[in-house]
Image (tube, rainbow, N blue to C red):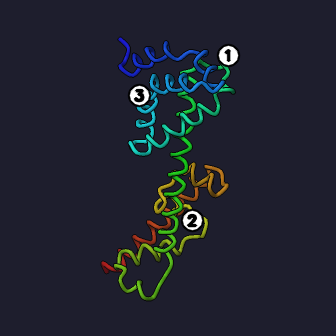
Amino acid sequence: MASPRRSIELRTRGRVSTALVKRIAHGDESAFATLYDTTCGLIYGLLLRMLGNSETAEQVLAAVYQEAWAQAATYDEKREEPLRWLITLARHRAIVRLSADSQERQAGLLKIAGRTLTTNPKTDEMISEPQRIVREALAALPPAQQQIIELAYFSGLRQNEIAAQLGLSLQLVQTGMRAGMMRLRESLIAVGETHSA
């Protein structure tokens, strides 16, 4: 038995024809309304699953149909069925949105990370002892290892994203991460032994 989503897709596929897209390419607004009415539930569901936020999914949904209207003339029936074409437009828009949101979040986190790692005599008094110890241990690392660890822990980047951002190989990022974490661990163990003695 087909899944509910697959059943909806199969029912929708039969109502979205190449002729409908060709009519849209010639500016037929009623054909566009038919396309929208027939497919918006399926496309919205896909976007909501990908984006996880109804408001964002609605914004991207509008952009998908604007693009479908604008790109209908470039639709190639030999490459894919009309519904598959629309799903591809939606997936692409969702990925672009996720990437843009991720970059904004990373930029914000980098600003926060930069503020937390810079020293400021006025705020240094308010930092707890464990925070001060970690900050000093991190500052003692070679700059490359420090940068990799900051991007991973303060910005939430995965190793492949760090490699892309810094223009390094994944292996170099992995090696730098491991070496930096080992040095941090050694520093923190040494500080812990000093305090317990």
Distance, label 3 to label 2, CA atoms, is 44 Å
**Sooner in the amino-acid sequence: mark 3 or mark 2:** 3
Which disc number belongs to residue 41? 3
**Sooner in the amino-acid sequence: mark 2 or mark 1:** 1
In the rendered view, tell whether residue 30 sits above or below residue 194: above
Decide: few, some or many residues near mark 1? Use Cα within 10 Å; few <14, some 14-19, many ≥20: few
Decide: few, some or many residues near mark 2? Use Cα within 10 Å; few <14, some 14-19, many ≥20: some
User: Left or right of 108: which side holds 193?
Assistant: left
Decide: few, some or many residues near mark 3? Use Cα within 10 Å; few <14, some 14-19, many ≥20: some
Residue lying at 50% horizontally and 26% vertically, measured from the top left: 33
* Image x and y of residue 154, in percent: 47, 63
Q: Amino acid at mark 1?
A: Lys
Residue lying at 44% horizontally and 66% vertically, measured from the top left: 185
User: Left or right of 4: which side holds 139?
Assistant: right
Quarter-of-image position of residue 192: bottom left
Q: Amino acid at mark 3?
A: Gly
Mark 2 — residue?
147
In the rendered view, tell whether residue 128 sits above or below residue 121: above
Quarter-of-image position of residue 196: bottom left
User: Left or right of 85: which side holds 51?
Assistant: left
Towards the viewer: 105 or 89: 89
* Viewer-side label of 2, 1: 1
Count of residue discs = 3
**SS state under label 3:** helix
Towards the viewer: 153 or 5: 5
Report the quarter where the C terminus lies: bottom left
Mark 1 — residue?
78
Which disc number belongs to residue 50? none
Report the quarter where the N terminus lies: top left
